[in-house]
Amino acid sequence: MRRLYVGGLSHAVTQKELKDRFGKFGDVVDVELRTRRDEEGVPYKTFGYINISISDADLKRCLTVLNKSKWKGGTLQIETAKESFLHRLAQERQAAADPDLQQTAADDGKQNLLDSLSKAGSTTSP
């Protein structure tokens, strides 16, 4: 599952149109449209986030075909979205509530440290 940021959208674009446009490259799970408005309520920036189940090859093809392309009066700007703060917070809260996940994360952290030391040439063992 990938989350894509799509900027440069026309203010008239609908979620269905965006889903149809990106559905050619993968399975679109969710579309969020956001419009920023000035003090008088006039829209000046419309962008969206798309959650899509897509392979690396199809993502590359999608970016090649759609990024910087003209569509409905705008020029699309597509990139992999940064992780949502709220999504990360929900994951951290879930991990804090589940002691098994905490132990797994701690074990993973220890293993990552050992792997890093091993790559750096340190031969110490735990």
Image (cartoon, helix red, strand yellow):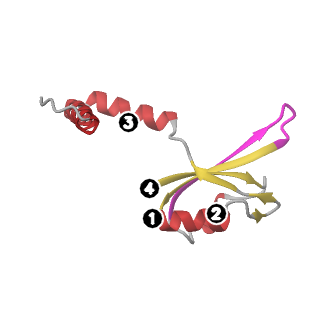
Q: Which residues are magenta?
A: 27-43
Frontmost residue, 121 versus 20? 121
Residue 22 shown left or right of residue 75 in the figure: left
As measured in the structure, the alpha-carbon distance from the residue carrying label 3 to the one carrying label 1 is 24 Å
Residue in the image at 61% along x and 62% along y: 63
Would you call the spot at circle 4 few (<14 residues within 10 Å), some (14-19), or many (20 or more)?
few
Asked if the residue under mark 4 is in contact with the one under mark 2, i.e. CB atoms within 8 Å, the reply is: no
Q: Which residue is mark 1?
A: 55
As measured in the structure, the alpha-carbon distance from the residue carrying label 2 to the one carrying label 4 is 19 Å
Asked if the residue under mark 1 is in contact with the one under mark 2, i.e. CB atoms within 8 Å, the reply is: no
Would you call the spot at circle 1 few (<14 residues within 10 Å), some (14-19), or many (20 or more)?
few
Residue in the image at 33% along x and 33% along y: 94
Q: Is residue 37 above or below residue 77?
A: above
Mark positioned earlier in the residue sequence (2 or 4) = 4
**Residue 40 found in image quarter:** top right
Residue in the image at 41% along x and 34% along y: 90
Q: Which residue is mark 3?
A: 91
Q: Position of residue 26 (x, y in %)?
A: 50, 67
Q: Position of residue 10 (x, y in %)?
A: 78, 55
Say if the magenta span includes residue 37.
Answer: yes
User: Which amino acid, by three-letter code, is at mark 3?
Assistant: Gln
Tell which tag, 4 or 1, sits nearer the viewer.
Answer: 1
On the question of residue 32 being in view, the answer is no
User: Which amino acid, by three-letter code, is at mark 2?
Assistant: Lys
Labelled disc at residue 16: 2
Q: Position of residue 103 (x, y in %)?
A: 20, 31
Q: Which residue is mark 4?
A: 1
User: Which amino acid, by three-letter code, is at mark 1?
Assistant: Ser
Circle 3 SS class: helix
